Each structure stands twice: as structure tokens, then as C-alpha cells.
Image (cartoon, grey):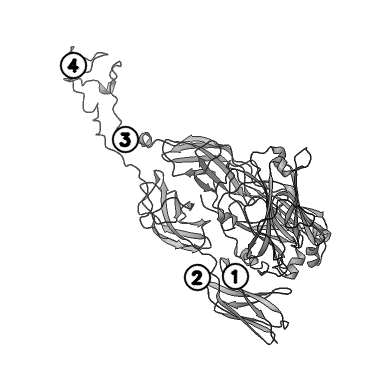
Amino acid sequence: MPSRRAAVTTAAGILLAALPPIAASAGTPEDLPGSWAATCVEPSSRYCIASATVTPTGGAATPLTGAGLTATAATVADDTGDWVRWAVTGWAGKAAAVTGGTVELVINTGPFVPRFTNATAAGLRVTRTRTDGNHLLRITGRAAPTAWTGDADCTAGNSCGDTDTTAAATEHRFEGRTQDLDGSAGAYAAALDGAYLATDAQARSDLLTYDPDGQPPLSLGVLGNPQLDANGVPVRNFVTLYLPGAWFLAQSTTASGARATGFDLVTSGEATVSRALATTLEDGGVRIEAPAVGLGADLAGAALHLRASRAAPGATVPAAPRAVTATGGVGTVTMRWQAPLSDGGSAITGYRVRAYAASSGGPVVSSCETATTSCMIEELVADTVYHVAVSAVNALGEGDPAARAEIRSADGATSTPEPTAPEPDVPSPVWPSPTTEPSPTTEPSPTTEPSPTTEPSPTTEPSPTVTPSPTAAPTLPSPTPSATLAVPSAPRAVHLTPGVRRITVTWDAPGSDGGSPVTGYTARAYRVAAGGTPVATCQATGGRAWCVLTGLAGGVRHHVTVSAVNAAGKGPEQALRPAATTWTVAGRPRSVAAKSAGRKVTVTWKAPATTGGTAITGYRAELTGPGTPVRCTAPATGRACTVKGLKTGRTFTVRVTAVNAAGVSSPSAAVKVKVRG
């Protein structure tokens, strides 16, 4: 089945470039411990867990330890600054009343100011208070059931696989990270002080992107998840975003005024879709909830607009297809079905068909995807039972599949048609049955009177001396095999065009169609020339001689094969496997330097060691320090840019990034510069 787009659109990538500046602020306490204390022993204790309780459904609050749960907190650091990472673990095997209960976690963060939280928790609410110079971070919510994999690429927001990627068994999670935003510009920290993001999506960006003058003004970065849960059901994630009152003031409006205007959460992946939202006024800000965002493996940018939602009222994913039937072939299964009773309020764009070895759960064995109501799954083992699920897709995502249909693929030893004799030009002879009188056309010629002793009896063969008339008994033609269908030969002239985590594959038709028209093609991408397990596939039907392999890892060389299919089955792949390297972001600019004179800062650099496979289109230099960050840009051929009108005596941290079609590179190593008059 074709993989889905695993890269954020270019526009979303550009938005990500506006992430808050990456600078370590002196405001972050220097004494943050690696591991925080499990309890606050003394009233003066800090960097510790003050309290941790769970209230089971229908029950009373109890310490986490009494329910067999454990709370932890620790300091972690990345390019965006220092975080407090907190979690409640031990959910496996707990009763539903516990996993569905409300957790309250209170952490004494000392002088560390907990401003922004990014969490995996349902019904999340985050507040803070300050006492005697110490901050108390209060986190409440429920453990979220998550359908994730152990793939670090998905967690990092690089790729969550393709549309057949199946998650591990569902796990409950109540965990997150909280940052002080001291490494961010003052305007960013002030506007988002108190904001939080909660989702059960495995892939998400660390921080929000805030551009007060941009449209949209806020981006959530990327969202994504393995396509299917452990039961083979498409995953639909929730997203909760809380924006404090200060954010709306920075937008020259109020929380209630913005809510009256509306919010439009737009995801941009394979389709650009406005998502259904529910909003409530809370703690002077607005809580925004998207309950069912069907992104799956298609990592997508997510942006919030201050405007009336453009989501179609009541629109959802399609219902399950109906009347699913299956026909087994040699190493194949052909599925047919009827369209769902409901398209969910959005036109159906295709169907996904997956074969499993088991009647429930398990990984996908093979699959196909189509825009029609039939599809043939290939690469199955002959004479083997499979369980096949069919689901429908629209712009909002993939709907639940129909019940799996059981089918056995045909046994190649008994299903191959035997050669048959061709029909003669004259009627085939009808020989007398041992119990039937000879027909008039086989009666002996009048000139050859049969002997009474040789007249055929009902149970006796005619005498060999009795020769039928030549016109009465045509000669049976010698059996000669008819033309037997064969699979098509390999497609020719396979050509690859790389892109952002994708490769477009084109080819010429095979030299031989095997005596039956080619009905489709399948392209496969491998990490090694020898083959093995494909990392992505795509199909083409209806005479189309191209398809796009998507969901590929960026900056990786992939080897591609193409095979053709006709009524006799799948043909061979071409002997030579061309290879192409998918695009990725460029490397970091090198040798960055900054000089100041005349209230200006001039930044210089060298080009990255790698372009990411596609041309660099420009550079951005960003100066972070007191106040709002300032930037200057340069074209692809430039190696310097200048920021003017700076205040004398201020010190800035400078970083440079490179831009190409895949997005924005990691920032260069930082240098500091002091503004001189």
C-alpha cells in the first residue's frame, strides 16, 4: 500500500522556523537537579513532588502509591532549553476505575517558573501558584490510552511509517514536560505564559510557534501517529490547547472576543482540513479541543487561525464498506465491496484493503489501495487462509474497517488451468454410449451390411470390421495445447525523481504483456540493493505508468523495483534496481561569525557540508537576547547579512539556519556578539 506523506508541507516547515529562539537564559536556575525528590520532606524543600493522588472513578482520592502507581520528575535539556519532565507510571493491569480516574500531581519547582507544558494526558489542566519564592505546578487529568510504537523517528516527528504501520498494544500514559521559556524571546514567553498542549499523538513538536504578525499567528508544529492500533483500527487522536489571556491581549483582542469570532484548526498533510473544535472560557483564557484528528502516519502541520471554523458541520470519517466479498487466486486475493452507507459528510477519496494472518489484531501481511470498489492483494502465500479488512477514506481520515472477511488463497498446484484441445471447425463427434443405440449419423453405411454376429449390442463395442462412413464420423483432432497466459515481463526504463521524503517512480510498459493486458503496477522501495523487506510501496492502475513512494526517511538512499500484473499474476521485477536519495533539510551552516560596529551586527558563515539533496534556497540569521528576536536573511548565494539599528551595549546570541524545499536546517553553533556604537 502506498505510504503516506511523512513530511510536513513546505509552508508548515517555514512556520517551524519561527520557533522561539534557542538560547540558554540566565533566568533558569543553575541548581536544577537531574532527578527530583519523590516527596517534599521539609516545608522549605524544592525540586520535589509535593503531592500525588488519583481519584478512581466513583471513588475517593488516594495517594498514587496506594493504587500501585509511581510519580517521578527530572530535569532534561534540549536545544530549546531546560524542561521538567514528569510522569505517572504503573498503569498496566490496573482496573478501569483507576486508569479512568483523575490524577493530581503537584510539583514544587522552586525558582524555576513553569510556563509552558506539553503533555500526553486526557482532560489536562495545568495551573501554578507561588509561595515564598517557590512555584507549585499543579497538573490534573486522566491517563490517555495511546497507540504508539517504539519507533524513535515517530516520537521525533520525522516519520511514523506508512498506512500499514501498526502500533503496539495500547498503553495508558500520564506524562509531560514543562518549560520556563527563559530561552525564548520576552514577547513569546509573556504571551504563552500558562499555555499548554495535550495530545495522545506520538509525534508532536516540543514548542508552539508564535508569530504575532503572521497568518496564522500560532502553529502547533507537527502531529502524527502510527496509522493503526493493535486491533487494526485507524487511530484518531485528540488535541487540547489552552491559550492564556495574555496571548489574546498580544493579538489585540480578548479571550471572549476571540471565542465569539471563532478558531480554525487546520492540518496540512496529504489533505488540508479544518478540524471540528469545542471551545470553553477557562481561567481567563480559552480551552480549545479537537476530539478526533485522523492524521495517522501522515505527519501534518497544524496551525490555529483566529477566524470562524471552516470545518464542515458534523463531518467525520466514512462508515465501513458493505457487502465485502473475497476471491482467492494463486498468491493473491481479490476483494469487492459496496460503498458505505455514509461518507461522513465528505466525499470518499479511496479505500484501503489489508490482509492479516489472524481474525483479529496482528500486523498487516499485504495490502492494496484503490479509488474503486475492488482491489487485488498480491504477495500472499498460496493455499493459505487470510483475514481481510476493507476501510474507506475521506479528507478527514480513514474510517473503521468492515469485519474481516476470511478467504483462502488458491493452491498453485491445482488452480493452474490445464491445456485444453481447441474446438474443431466441424461438430465434435458423439460416440455411441454403451447403453444407447448408435445415432443415425454413426449408423454403418448401407453398402456395408454388418454381420449379425458383429452388430453392436447395447453392451458390446461395434465390431472392428464395421467401418463407419467417412461422412458420418468425423476424425477427432489431435489434442494440442492452446495458448497459455503468462505473467508480463518486467517494466522497462524505470526512472526515479527524489523529493521530500518521497520518490516519484516512472517506467515504460513491459516488452511482453504475457498474452493478457497489464492491469496494474507495483513499485517497491528497499534500503539495500539486494531487496529484503520493502520500506514503502505504491501502485498504479488504469494504464498509469507512475506512482509516488512516500513516507520514506529523509536523506536516505533507496533502491526501487517495479513489477507488472495481469490476469495470470505478478510479473518479475526489473533486474537493475535504480536508486535515489530522498531530500531532507540541509546541514547546519558552518564557521558562523558576528561582528558589530555602528549599532549594526554583520553575520557571516560558510555553506553547510550537505544540501539535503536539493538546492539551498536561502539563509536566516537570528539574534536573540533582550526583547524580541531580530533576523536578517540572505539568498542561496549569500554568505552574510546585517541587522541594523540595535541598541549599543546589548549582547546577542547568533545562530544561522539554511532553508531548502525540505524545510529549515538545525541551527548553527551559537556565537555571541556585543553591539558597538
Residues shaded magenta: 468-487
Amino acid under disc 4: Pro
Disc 1 or disc 4, which is closer to the eye? 1
Compared with residue 420, is residue 201 higher up or lower down, i.e. above or below? Answer: below
Q: Is residue 367 left or right of residue 315?
A: left
Cα separation between marks 2 and 4: 99 Å
N-terminal of the pair, mark 2 or mark 3, is 3
Number of dots carrying numbers: 4
Check if residue 473 falls in the magenta segment.
Answer: yes
Disc 1 or disc 2, which is closer to the eye? 1
Q: Nearer the viewer, residue 300 or 118?
A: 118
Question: Tag 3's secondary structure?
Answer: loop
Amino acid under disc 1: Pro
Query: What residue is disc 1 on?
Result: 667
Q: Nearer the viewer, residue 460 or 517?
A: 517
Image spot of residue 479 (x, y percent): 26, 34
Q: Which residue, as the protein is rendered here, is positioned at the far front?
A: 42
Q: Is residue 310 visible?
A: no
Query: 10 Å neighbourhood of mark 3: few (<14), some, or many (≥20)?
Result: few
Compared with residue 263, is residue 468 higher up or lower down, i.e. above or below? Answer: above
Cα separation between marks 4 and 3: 36 Å
Query: What residue is disc 3 on?
Result: 420
Amino acid under disc 2: Thr
